[in-house]
Image (spheres, rainbow, N blue to C red):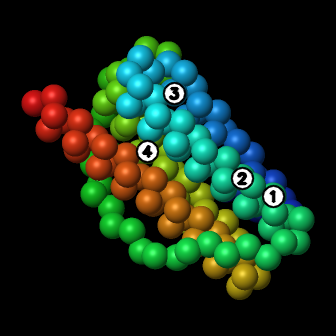
């Protein structure tokens, strides 16, 4: 991972990644044919947008509070493979698996960013944002679990 020279570079990097996540979930929602599925991805696009806004507010010097509850991990993404890499033709099952993997990557990113800052305040913020990504992953794991049992 790139070594950042200051907190602004870290925040800019995190903001960019939240925008990418927002775009990803927005695209999945646009490609969805089912209203329920579309709404799940719209909800997550909104979550990523909130994360971006939090990071932008922090960069502007505003005082931000984020909850820090611990989240369990079902590890579903570690045992299954995505059959389609084309986001436009992805099944709901594959979209959920890809979303799980992306949320896991976002979690790891925030934990790495937490390690790269000397600021205790910023470390706590990044750890809490990592926890938010873990919540997202758990929600996708739950949706996947419900979907697989519903289909089988």
Circle 4 residue: 101
Residue 131, how many percent across, how many down?
A: 50, 67
Quadrant containing the C terminus is: top left
Q: Are marks 1 and 2 in contact (CB under 8 Å)?
A: yes
1 or 4: tag closer to the N-terminus: 1
State the SS at label 3: helix
3 or 4: tag closer to the N-terminus: 3
Q: Is residue 118 left or right of residue 107?
A: right
Q: Which mark is residue 39?
A: none
Residue 74, how many percent across, how many down?
A: 27, 57
Mark 1 surroundings: few (<14), some (14-19) or many (≥20) residues within 10 A: some
Which residue corresponds to the image point at 16% horizontal and 34% vertical from the top-left? 150
Q: Quadrant of residue 71?
A: bottom left
Q: Are marks 3 and 2 in contact (CB under 8 Å)?
A: no
How far apart are the two marked residues, 2 and 4, measured between alpha carbons?
Answer: 19 Å
Mark 3 surroundings: few (<14), some (14-19) or many (≥20) residues within 10 A: many
Mark 4 surroundings: few (<14), some (14-19) or many (≥20) residues within 10 A: some
State the SS at label 4: helix
Circle 3 residue: 29
Q: Quadrant of residue 124?
A: bottom right
Quadrant containing the N terminus is: bottom right
46 over 90 or under it: above or below: below
Q: Are marks 3 and 4 in contact (CB under 8 Å)?
A: no
Residue lying farthest right? 60
101 over 111 or under it: above or below: above
How far apart are the two marked residues, 3 and 2, measured between alpha carbons?
Answer: 19 Å
Residue 129, how many percent across, how many down?
A: 59, 65
Circle 2 residue: 52
Residue lying farthest left? 152
Which residue corresponds to the image point at 84% horizontal and 72% vertical from the top-left? 62
């Amino acid at each position: 991972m790139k070594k950042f020279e200051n907190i602004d570079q870290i925040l800019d990097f995190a903001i960019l990644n939240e925008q990418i996540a927002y775009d990803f979930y927005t695209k999945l929602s646009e490609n969805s044919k089912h209203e329920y599925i579309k709404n799940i991805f719209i909800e997550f696009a909104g979550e990523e947008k909130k994360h971006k806004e939090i990071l932008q507010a922090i960069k502007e010097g505003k005082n931000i509070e984020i909850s820090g509850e611990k989240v369990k991990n079902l590890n579903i993404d570690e045992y299954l493979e995505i059959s389609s890499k084309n986001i436009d033709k992805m099944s709901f099952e594959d979209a959920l698996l890809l979303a799980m993997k992306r949320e896991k990557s976002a979690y790891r990113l925030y934990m790495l960013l937490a390690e790269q800052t000397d600021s205790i305040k910023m470390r706590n913020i990044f750890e809490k944002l990592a926890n938010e990504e873990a919540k997202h992953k758990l929600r996708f794991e739950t949706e996947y679990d419900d979907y697989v049992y519903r289909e089988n």
